[in-house]
Image (cartoon, helix red, strand yellow):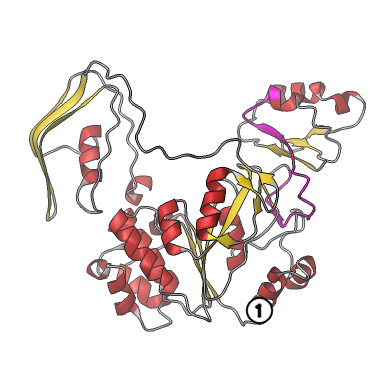
């Protein structure tokens, strides 16, 4: 049975524990070095010697995973990040004239797969020691498949790719200047005005890239991607940071990019948006942070239903133990005694030309409260006031109990 070993040495730093794990291994005890410690202090497992006994994962469950791969995996890896690190076994297929979605949990290799197609990552075909493979190696590896034709077209310049990365919050750290100036630099189509109007960012063109919100950053990144002349547009999570109104608007815009001669690949977690934006879908399955496999392409509605069921009938693969079900009503919980944590009255804060007001309210123990509204209406500002990150100008805020507040923000300035 094919087997891989995954070791997270960032979680396994105790050298005495590493040596102890070595002594536990039956193969090591028999005189062969299945588990060793490299010169730089990393614990390494030789997969060809591993018997899958399961002893070492029990000794370091947060750092070591031994995975018995499905029998269906007969191909060699397409990419591996390093010894005892994540492995990708297949790639999605762009289909011209269609939007193809990619659906799967985090850590399963979606971003890795589309970065390979975009040319951001050179696949090493599992040989992480020699670096990325050249086109001739790739063509030989994918001989007889759609991927062979794709990489031939990339090599010969018949396909140009434009790629929108996932982590748009990192853009202000690597890019400086006004939004409009940055977009003009990448405008190969002469459609800056039309595209920025369609994505509703014309009013921020004179803003510095470091001063705009997460939702605005997302739309700027999509604009930059689509202003380039390309045959294949690749979007990694294009609707994150966006409210539902903007998600629908961006989805319509992405769909409009497709012609007989162009194609779109999009990674998307929101099943409703995926159903709206995509014509076809690839499912990605495997083990989180261990390995990933791309399924065959499916009509989007059928693909979503297969994903919810956890079983791919055509490939005879069960990738989840249970089905995902959506109930008509949430379960009824016994109401707990209301104990106030924090309350406020007539709060007001002014930031530039923006004014936020909240008349009266409170949060009790045992409550989960959602805040719904469009981007730019003050949801994050209000959360910062409750967390004590911002101080309100008027009104009262009272903590009824001693609180430890954890606050998460999408503002990229808070991440720098």
Q: On the image, which quarter does residue 26 sit in?
A: top right
Horizontal arrangement in the rendering, residue 221 relative to residue 232 (left or right): left
**For the view shown, which residue lies furthest in the front direction?**
328
Secondary structure state at the residue bearing disc 1: helix
Q: Position of residue 75 (x, y in %)?
A: 78, 55
Which quadrant: the N terminus? Answer: top right
Vertical position of residue 338 compared to residue 369: above or below: above
Vertical position of residue 350 compared to residue 10: above or below: below
Horizontal arrangement in the rendering, residue 365 relative to residue 33 (left or right): left
Q: Position of residue 341 (x, y in %)?
A: 22, 22
Q: Residue at x 30, y 28 (%)?
A: 405
Q: Position of residue 228 (x, y in %)?
A: 45, 77
- 351 or 126, which is in the foreground? 126
Q: Residue at x 51, y 59 (%)?
A: 300
Q: Position of residue 87 (x, y in %)?
A: 69, 49
- Is 367 colored magenta in this rendering? no
Vertical position of residue 413 compared to residue 275: above or below: above
**Residue beneath disc 1:** 153
Horizontal arrangement in the rendering, residue 333 relative to residue 349 (left or right): right
Horizontal arrangement in the rendering, residue 327 relative to residue 161 (left or right): left
- 161 or 282, which is in the foreground? 282
Vertical position of residue 16 compared to residue 123: above or below: above
Q: On the image, which quarter does residue 115 sit in?
A: bottom right
Few, some or many residues within 10 Å of mark 1 (<14, 14–19, 20+): few
Q: On the image, which quarter does residue 185 sit in?
A: bottom left
**For the view shown, which residue lies furthest in the top direction?**
337
Q: Which residues are magenta?
A: 58-83
- 39 or 242, which is in the foreground? 242
- 290 or 119, which is in the foreground? 290
Residue 119 seen by the camera: no
Residue 412 seen by the camera: yes
- Is 76 colored magenta in this rendering? yes
């Amino acid at each position: 049975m094919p087997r891989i070993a995954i070791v997270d040495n960032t979680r396994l730093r105790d050298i005495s524990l590493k040596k102890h794990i070595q002594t536990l291994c039956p193969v090591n005890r028999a005189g062969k070095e299945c588990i060793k410690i490299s010169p730089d202090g990393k614990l390494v497992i030789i997969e060809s010697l591993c018997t899958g006994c399961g002893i070492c994962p029990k000794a370091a469950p947060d750092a070591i995973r031994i995975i018995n791969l499905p029998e269906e995996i007969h191909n060699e890896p397409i990419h591996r990040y390093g010894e005892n690190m994540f492995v990708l076994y297949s790639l999605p297929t762009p289909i011209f004239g269609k939007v193809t979605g990619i659906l799967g949990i985090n850590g399963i290799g979606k971003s890795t797969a589309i970065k390979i197609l975009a040319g951001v990552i050179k696949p090493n075909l599992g040989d992480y020691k020699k670096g990325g493979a050249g086109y001739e190696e790739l063509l030989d590896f994918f001989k007889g498949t759609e991927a062979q034709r794709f990489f031939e077209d990339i090599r010969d310049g018949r396909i140009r790719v434009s790629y929108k990365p996932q982590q748009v919050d990192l853009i202000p750290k690597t890019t400086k200047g006004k939004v409009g100036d940055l977009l003009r630099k990448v405008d190969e189509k002469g459609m800056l005005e039309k595209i920025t109007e369609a994505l509703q960012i014309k009013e921020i063109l004179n803003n510095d890239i470091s001063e705009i919100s997460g939702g605005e950053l997302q739309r700027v990144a999509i604009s930059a991607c689509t202003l380039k002349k390309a045959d294949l547009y690749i979007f990694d999570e294009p609707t994150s940071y966006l409210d539902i109104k903007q998600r629908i608007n961006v989805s319509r815009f992405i769909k409009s990019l497709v012609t007989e001669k162009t194609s779109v690949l999009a990674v998307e977690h929101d099943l409703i948006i995926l159903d709206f934006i995509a014509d076809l879908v690839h499912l990605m399955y495997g083990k989180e942070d261990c390995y990933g496999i791309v399924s065959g392409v499916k009509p989007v509605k059928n693909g979503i239903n297969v994903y919810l069921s956890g079983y791919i009938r055509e490939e005879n693969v069960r990738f989840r133990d249970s089905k995902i079900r959506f109930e008509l009503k949430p379960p009824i919980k016994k109401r707990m005694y209301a104990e106030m944590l924090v309350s406020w009255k007539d709060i007001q804060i002014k930031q530039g030309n923006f004014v936020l007001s909240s008349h009266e309210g409170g949060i009790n123990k045992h409550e989960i409260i959602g805040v719904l509204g469009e981007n730019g209406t003050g949801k994050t500002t209000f959360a910062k006031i409750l967390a004590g990150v911002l101080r309100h100008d008027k009104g009262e805020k009272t903590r009824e109990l001693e609180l430890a507040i954890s606050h998460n923000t999408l503002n990229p300035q808070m991440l720098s």
